Amino acid sequence: MKFTVLSLFPEILQGFFESSIMAKAVERGSIEYELINIRDYAFDKHRTCDDAPYGGGAGMVMKAEPVALALESVKSAGKKTVFMSPSGNLFNQNMAAELSTEQEVVILCGRYEGVDQRIIDAYIDTEISIGDYVLSSGETAALVVIDAVYRLIDGVINSESLEEESFSKGLLEYPHYTRPETFQGMKVPDILLSGHHANIEKWRREKSLEKTRKNRPDLLSASATSEYEMEDQDGLD
């Protein structure tokens, strides 16, 4: 899979692709990336990519011409092209899974008050928001999307780990513990030391439901709850 990211500040993104698991995925060839500096497609010697909005108002708007030329340089037509915007569709795990099936995702990073609407109308397939708040940098939002998507590509993360993560079954993930057995007077739950795998799995399902009820009750559905309860019942048969 390839990520092509268009930005006024590509240096913000570079380090991510050169670090940790992503760097290994790039080295193995599982992930490709290309960072495009939109300023390279500006017309004047100052590489100007923003201007005052028509109709007045605070702030500046990214100009259509350099953005269009940058998008055309990477042949975005026919490729999944997204724009990071606080007014976009709210990003979630299902959206990450859908994007992970694409051969290439082109991401346009916004700045200032956003981009000329004509770019969105002519070039963008989907606007994506990572939450109900505003950032000064579309680059940081793009990194959230890239991180959520690339780890779903075959060979990047152990598939067994992905199956038990938060949202993978509609619920949050159960709590984890590691050595030492006692830390600041707090002990690892006895069930995790028992070696009884069936009981451990039941405990994890219960804790997953408990955590979701406490932190994200909006994720709970009758079907998800009953599914887990049925699994617990099966384990007792």
Image (spheres, grey):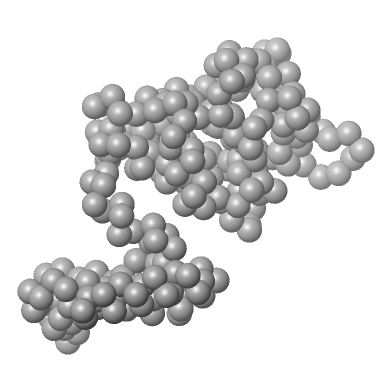
Question: Could you tell me which quadrant the C terminus lies in?
Answer: bottom left
* Residue at 28% in and 32% down: 25
Residue 226, percent from left and from top: 42, 75
Residue closest to the eye, 49 or 36: 36
Question: Could you tell me which quadrant the N terminus lies in?
Answer: top left
Residue 87, percent from left and from top: 70, 48
Residue closest to the eye, 95 or 148: 95
* In this view, 145 is above or below 27: below
Residue 122, percent from left and from top: 73, 25
* Residue at 7% in and 74% down: 195
When asked about the image quadrant of residue 115, the answer is: top right
| Image-based side of 173 in relation to 43, left or right | left
Residue 236, percent from left and from top: 21, 80
Q: Which residue lies furthest to the bottom in this view?
A: 185
Q: Residue furthest left?
A: 195
Q: Residue furthest front?
A: 237
Residue closest to the eye, 52 or 190: 190
